[in-house]
Image (cartoon, rainbow, N blue to C red):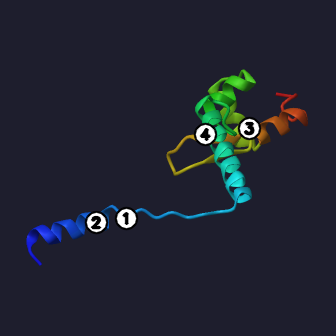
Amino acid sequence: MNKKETNKKETQNQMQIAAAFIPREEWEETRSMIAEIAQTVKDNADGNSEILKSKDVCKMLKIGRATFDRLKEKGVLPVYRIGKAGNWYCKKSELMRIIHDGKLQDL
């Protein structure tokens, strides 16, 4: 096989396309899941994330960073840290729960 034939064979191998056929019901379910994932990504990009940074918690509660740190140390705020020197994070649902339960009333 000469060089030209080898290049042609390599090009043909690279251009192969695979197709899979799935039932319409499965396709609709997959499309729905993709749409849901896309909405979640959009919500997170728009600031409607379930995960809040410490500065976002401070804004929501109208408190300063020192108060945030005090509540964190007392265990009032359910916060998490990623890495040793990383930011503090709080789940929005957990924050809303402690607000609803009145755990921040006596601060």
Residue position marked by numbered label 3 in the rendering:
92
Question: Residue at the right extreme?
Answer: 101
Q: Residue at x 84, y 33 (%)?
A: 99
Residue position marked by numbered label 2 in the rendering:
12
Cα distance, mark 1 to mark 2?
Answer: 7 Å
Q: Residue at x 65, y 34 (%)?
A: 43
Q: The residue tagged with tag 2: helix, strand or loop?
A: helix
Cα distance, mark 1 to mark 3?
Answer: 47 Å
Residue 41: mark in rendering:
4
Residue position marked by numbered label 1 in the rendering:
16
Q: Amino acid at mark 3?
A: Lys
**N-term-proximal mark, 4 vs 1:** 1
Question: Residue at the left extreme?
Answer: 2
Which image quadrant: the C terminus?
A: top right
Cα distance, mark 4 to mark 1?
Answer: 32 Å
Q: The residue tagged with tag 1: helix, strand or loop?
A: loop
Q: Amino acid at mark 2?
A: Gln
Cα distance, mark 3 to mark 2?
Answer: 53 Å
Cα distance, mark 4 to mark 2?
Answer: 38 Å
Q: Dot 3 surroundings within 10 Å: few (below 14), some, or many (20 or more)? A: some
Q: Amino acid at mark 4?
A: Val
Q: Say if 88 sits above or below 5 in the image.
A: above
Q: The residue tagged with tag 3: helix, strand or loop?
A: helix
